[in-house]
Amino acid sequence: MKVVKVFNNNVVLVNIKNHQQAILFGNGIGFKKQPGDQITKGNGVQTFIKNIKDPEWLNSLSNLLENVPLEYLAVAKNIVDHAEKKLGTRFNQFLIISLADHIYFAVKRTSNNNISSLTSVKNVYPLEYEEAKEGVKRINATFNVKLPAGEISLIAIHFVENEISPIDENKQSNENYVTLHLSKVLQIIITDLGYPAKPTALERLTVHLRFLISQIQSNKTYLNDKSQDNKQILDSFLKQFPELKGTLKKLQDYFFQEMDYKLNSSERLYLVIHLKQVESSSQDE
């Protein structure tokens, strides 16, 4: 095998037979190696991924390894491999990278935040949820931490988002559509406002968002917008709590850009009320 690229002392890209490429990782495998050097797969060296064809994947891996230790990548691969076998499916290769990144930051923040569980994910994707639960157990054991139960739902969403087998876009379920957008919208909110200390705040917001997104997916308006009262109440609410304007604007942009839907004033009002509940709960921490 010939070295194509050295990511660091422990991770290298190599050429194997039939012009295929693979990622190898193991302690010291890349030490003092240069592109073109011959390399032997010794004891303790693992083949990370075979037949790499996507240069963007290699760039993502390189960026990840600048910030995330190798052991997080190894745990992510272990979780993905196990999930593929148990679920009888195949995942996008980018899942390993995104999951390693997620695990790293989840472990770092575990002592600071408590993420409430999204019961909707458990109900809609029970198999992925159970496999994610096993993954969290593996993470806890490897890094000697205790991740909050909410991480199970977030990892399950990673599974759902990256499943590529069986490939049949026409049969993508309504719930899959809702859950994918739900996870991204919640990410915007939590990034801006933080994790609420009270699980009920996030649960209520999740129920609201699920119904809203379901109605959009069905080409239906969630709330009637004929009344001018709601617009006046919304304006008054935002004057009283101007810190919510930025988050609401991000959500409006997401719904318009990603779902081709313009939130009306009634929908924005109900949404901003939930945002205030999340913000107030986050400040209680």
Image (cartoon, grey):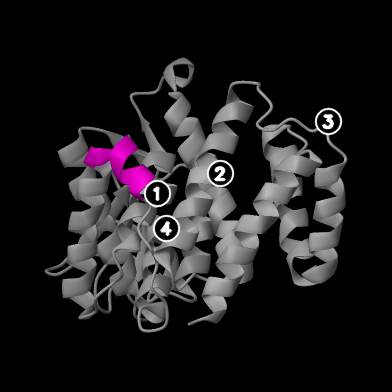
Q: Which residue is mark 4?
A: 97
Residue 226: give its label: 3
Report if residue 58 lies within the magenta region.
no
Residue 158: give its label: 1
Q: Secondary structure at mark 1?
A: helix
The amino acid at mark 3 is Lys
Q: Decide: marks 2, 1 in contact (CB < 8 A)?
A: no
Percent coordinates x, y for residue 164 in the rendering? 39, 32
The amino acid at mark 2 is Leu
The amino acid at mark 1 is His
Q: Which residues are magenta?
A: 119-127
Is the magenta region chiefly helix, strand or loop?
A: helix
Point out the tag, 4 or 3, that comes first from the N-terminus.
Answer: 4
The residue shown at (70%, 41%) is: 255
Q: Can the viewer see residue 70?
A: yes
Distance from disc 4 to disc 1, alpha carbons, whole Å, reads 11 Å
Distance from disc 4 to disc 2, alpha carbons, whole Å, reads 28 Å
The amino acid at mark 4 is Ile
The residue shown at (27%, 79%) is: 28
Percent coordinates x, y for residue 235 in the rendering? 86, 56
Q: Which residue is mark 2?
A: 209
Closer to the eye: label 4 or 1: 1
